[in-house]
Image: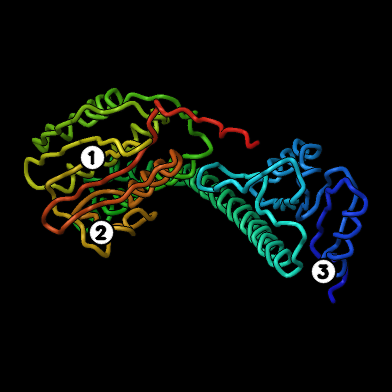
Amino acid sequence: MRATEDLSTVQLLITEDGNRAAVRELLTGYYDVETEQAVGEADLYLVDERSLPEYHDALRERVESSDPVFCPVVLIRRRDSALRINLPDPGEREPPLLIDDIVDAPLNPHLLFRRMNTLLVRRNQSEDLIHYLTKLEESNRSLEQFAYAASHDLQEPLRMVSSYLQLIDQRYGDELDDDADEFLAFAIDGAERMRRMIDGLLAYSRVDEEGAPLEPTDLNAVVEDVLDDLQVQIDEQEAVVSVDSLPRVTGDSDQLRQLFQNLVSNAIEYSRDRPHVDIEAERDGTEWQISIHDDGIGIEDGDQERIFDVFQRLHSHDEHSGTGIGLALCKRIVDRHGGQIWVESEPGDGSTFVFTLPDSSVADVDPNPET
């Protein structure tokens, strides 16, 4: 038998002394049994129908305060009870439920232990998961802080390098031979690319920390601003951008502007002559599915997931400019809005970038209280 401190704690919320003593005797040795008659911090609660009205509110508070760690409650359903409580269908209610399982009196020890152990395993798994997620969040925060600090600290020395390279070019450019001119041009271009990468990395690390509150946002206004900002690129490439009627969503307008700007700019950049870009919206339940389709070069199947990772590029700088952060930033923004982003593409047949955003007309509704 395990030591007492290794046992799961089960609290008996049974008001009748005789029944409480009988159940305690049944469970002792298998669990650490607590018989105090005020709801405490136990791993599982065992309550009978006659006692439930007295403990209902306190149990509800305990279960809700424990969420998302699972806090199981088992009800003993007695034949002579005036109450007739049935186990609710989990599919019809939002968690956490108050009653997780029901056993009938007289108690069958094997059935009772099996039901309780199953619930306790689920509780342990939920605790492990929350612990893992907490560690993961801490790790992500540390990485974000590192990325921000590193990027911020790199800006000043990089500005100095760029400034002195430009000074050399301005003062001594006429005295340099062709090779020196070429080397200097490479150095200036490399410094400029690094500056853009640092700016992109800073934007990526700031998505969660410095984002504005999510609120109803008109995507028509967002895209209108984006197309104004991209007008030079649109004119140079003789692009045609068709925009469907777009919905109102719940979002951060500045981040959504960055999202559309990156995707539309890429659609034009990676298309053939006189590209055509279509922006459409389709409702899907409580979300809107936004698609941006181009008639460009397309993307291989094996590259369609990794393009959303930081610093992943499919083409050289000579072929297409970019930092390898733009699509990663798009994914980060969509993630913050609780959506998903993916690409559907065939090489040589264009690409469609699709992402989901929550409909602003859908209000958060609290689940009905369980009775």
Is the residue marked by circle 1 packed among few (<14), some (14-19), or many (20+) residues within 10 Å?
some
Viewer-proximal residue among 186 and 139: 139
Residue depicted at x 50% and y 30%: 364
Name the mark nearer the viewer: 1 or 3: 3
**Can residue 199 be spotted in the picture?**
no
| Disc 2 target residue | 314
Viewer-proximal residue among 272 and 55: 55
Q: Earlier in the sequence, mark 2 or mark 1?
A: 1
| Disc 1 target residue | 265
Is the residue marked by circle 3 packed among few (<14), some (14-19), or many (20+) residues within 10 Å?
some
Judge from the rendering whether residue 29 lies leftward or rightward of residue 283; answer left or right: right
Task: Residue 30: give its label.
Answer: 3
- Give the secondary structure at mark 1: helix
Q: Earlier in the sequence, mark 1 or mark 3?
A: 3
- Give the secondary structure at mark 3: loop
Q: Earlier in the sequence, mark 3 or mark 2?
A: 3
Which residue appears farthest toward the left when viewing the image?
A: 273
Judge from the rendering whether residue 227 lies leftward or rightward of residue 108; answer left or right: left
Estimate the x, y position of residue 130 in percent, counting from the top left: 63, 54
Residue depicted at x 55% and y 47%: 89
Question: Mark 2 is on which residue type?
Answer: Leu
Estimate the x, y position of residue 358 in percent, counting from the top left: 39, 35
- Give the secondary structure at mark 2: loop
342 lies above or below 289: below
**Can residue 202 be spotted in the picture?**
yes
Residue depicted at x 89% and y 52%: 35
